[in-house]
Image (spheres, rainbow, N blue to C red):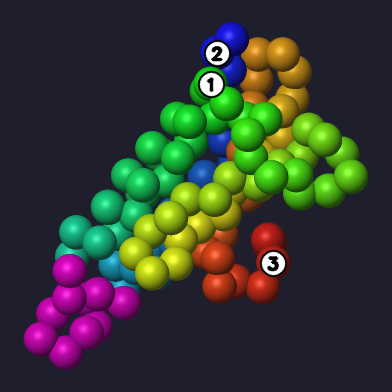
Amino acid sequence: MTFEVRLTRDAQEDLQVLFDFLLHRELTRPGGGDLDLAAKAITALEDGFATLQSSPFSCRKAASNPFLRELIVPFGATGYLALFEITDAQTVTIAAVRHQRETDYH
């Protein structure tokens, strides 16, 4: 079984915020930082999203609803979390993406 993975508008905005944050942080590092880091983070997230096509039920439950789950995407010393719902037998919808050190989804 293969699922189609969709992102809500909020999740797309979350990705843009994460990208912008990393890029700004690296640009302001003394001596310059790793300007490829933001793109590498997005690639790691996209690779993680791809795993949802085949195995969304392998991710941890995020609530009492068994179809609401969290994908953990390792990146560097920490990583990211993607909140998603298995919408139907063919679709996974990513609702939000955050850094693991953030206190909650927005």
Q: Residue 102's image quarter?
A: bottom right
Mark 3 or 1, nearer chain start? 1
SS of the residue under disc 3: loop
Left or right? Give the position of 61 relative to 37: right
Q: Amino acid at mark 2?
A: Thr
Q: Quote the CA–CA distance across marks 3 and 1.
A: 27 Å
Mark 3 or 2, nearer chain start? 2
The nearer-to-camera label among 3 and 2 is 2
SS of the residue under disc 1: loop
Going 48% across and 36% down the picture, which residue do you hit?
A: 49
| Residue 32 seen in this snapshot | yes
Q: Amino acid at mark 3?
A: Asp
**Residue position for label 1:** 54
The nearer-to-camera label among 3 and 1 is 1
Disc 3 crowd rating (10 Å Cα; few below 14, some 14-19, many 20+) is few
**Residue position for label 3:** 104
**Residue position for label 2:** 2
Spot occupied by residue 60 in the image (x, y as percentages of width and height): 69, 45
